Image (cartoon, rainbow, N blue to C red):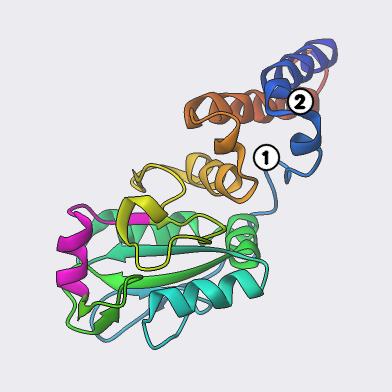
Amino acid sequence: MRRYGWMLLGLAALLIAPLSVAATEALPPPVGPEAPRVAPIKEEDGLYRQSWFQLSFLNLREDFSEAKADGKRFAVIFEQHGCPYCIKLHNDVLALKYINDYVRENFRIVQLDLWGAREVTDFDGKVMSEKALAERWGVIFTPTIVFYKDDLTGLDGKWGRELEAVERLPLSFGQHTFYDLFVWVRHKIYERDRNFQRFHISRIAERDALKAAASPKGN
């Protein structure tokens, strides 16, 4: 079994190789400590949120600039009251210590309510409610996260897809896919390979190899 584990590790390395050696050296481990679990905050409006979600005046360009100055990537997440996938995101996925730590340390996230009335200033300076912004951006599913490019130079006055780093993916999946997505964005692997699934498969192979290597001999 130990020999099998090393073979899987070799396979994982081959899968990741196209991403470039420099990129893989900086990647975080594919798994980490799950405890102590991180409990979310449940607001009066029924939405769950993380204590470290960005509290701001909801001027998105200013929020982006603050994130960049802090060396973090910027993202906006849309949620809604009663959304089962939103509840799962906070109570099952972000509750795991290694995932919560990674996202908190590498991203600034502004949480918006799909049906909310708070005023938000879009990147082009237009002011509207959260609900109107969601309609403007074409967001219809929750939770939806919008990742932004790490550099918006030359994009003054622009808004929407032109500013986004990757295609939007609904976050109705499990811990490993969620974690891999954030690693893929943080390390800008999408610049070399737009296929997230290819990266995700390579990370699955790493996890399987680690699990096999850790199994008692003969099991």
Q: Which label is found at residue 211?
A: none
**Residue where numbered disc 2 is placed:** 215
Q: Residue at x 78, y 17 (%)?
A: 5
* Residue 81 visible: no
Q: Where is 41 relative to 218, above or below?
A: below
212 relative to 108, above or below: above
Q: Helix, strand, or loop for circle 1?
A: loop
Q: Quadrant of residue 207?
A: top right
Extreme front residue here?
154
Residue 137: x and y in percent read 23, 58
Sequence-earlier tag: 1 or 2: 1
Q: Determine the residue positioned at 18% across, 62% down.
A: 136
Residue type indicated by callout 2: Ser
Q: Which residues are magenta?
A: 130-145
Residue drawn where x is 57% and y is 72% of the image: 67
Left or right placement of residue 9 versus residue 92 in this view: right
- Secondary structure of the residue carrying numbered label 2: loop
Q: Is residue 168 magenta?
A: no
Q: How far is disc 1 from disc 2 in space, using C-alphas?
A: 17 Å
Residue 33, placed above or below residue 156 = above
Q: Quadrant of residue 36?
A: bottom right
- Report if residue 142 lies within the magenta region: yes
- Residue 77 location (% of width, % of height): 36, 63
49 left or right of 176 in image: left
111 or 11, which is in the foreground?
111
Residue 152 in the image: above or below residue 15:
below
Q: Residue at x 32, y 71 (%)?
A: 124
Quarter of the N terminus within the rendering: top right
| Residue corresponding to mark 1 | 30
- Residue type at mark 1 is Pro
Contact between marks 1 and 2 (CB within 8 A): the answer is no
